[in-house]
Amino acid sequence: MSDTNNRRISRFMIGDSHPSLAGHFPGRPLVAGVIVLEEVQNALSTFWPGRVLAAFPQVKFVSPLLPGEWAELELVRLDTDQFDFRVTREGALIASGKVRA
């Protein structure tokens, strides 16, 4: 984890045994988008304690995240309750969007 003023960065990996992978998709599992967003929520509450997720007003998924792959999550605080996020894998964009908390 790193912390630079209003910008925070962390890494995460969803392992092969995560329960959501069994049905998403059999034979070729992908990390579900909701699991990626859960990581955004977890990072938000870790970096800014007391903040409660209110909404994801904008989210765009660009490429899949596979089980066992490391992803980097960047959160940028824009103002009191607005944040931007980007999730990348080795520099390639996986997802981006806005968070209200």
Image (tube, grey):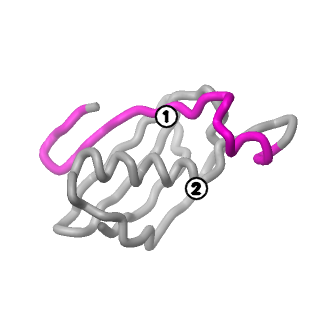
Task: Say above or below: 60 vs 92.
Answer: below
Total marks placed: 2
The type of residue carrying mark 1 is Ala
Left or right: residue 88 versus residue 65 is left
Secondary structure at badge 1 equals strand
Which residue, as the protein is rendered here, is positioned at the far left?
Answer: 5
| Quadrant assignment for the N terminus | top left
Q: Is residue 5 left or right of residue 40?
A: left
Camera-side mark, 1 or 2: 2
Task: Write the residue at 30% across / 67% down.
Answer: 101
Q: CA distance from mark 1 to mark 2?
A: 15 Å
Q: Earlier in the sequence, mark 1 or mark 2?
A: 2
Q: Which mark is residue 48?
A: none
- Mark 2 closeness class: few <14, some 14–19, many ≥20 residues within 10 Å: few
Which amino acid, mark 2? Answer: Val
Expressed as whole percent of the image width and height from the top left, the position of residue 91 reads: 47, 34
Find the residue positioned furthest to the front. 19
Q: Is residue 13 magenta?
A: yes
Q: Secondary structure at mark 2?
A: helix
Question: How many C-alpha atoms fall within 10 Å of the one at disc 1: few (<14), some, or many (≥20)?
Answer: many
* In the foreground, 14 or 91: 14
Q: Which mark is residue 34?
A: 2
Residue 45 in picture, x, y percent from top left: 30, 52
* Residue 36 image offset from top left, x and y in percent: 53, 48
Whole-percent x, y for residue 27 in the image: 87, 35
Q: Over which residues does the magenta segment extend? A: 2-25
* Residue 7, magenta (yes or no): yes
Residue at 33% x, 69% y is 100
Residue at 22% of width from left, 62% of height from top?
78
| Residue found 34% across the figure and 58% down from its top | 84
Q: Which residue is mark 1?
A: 71
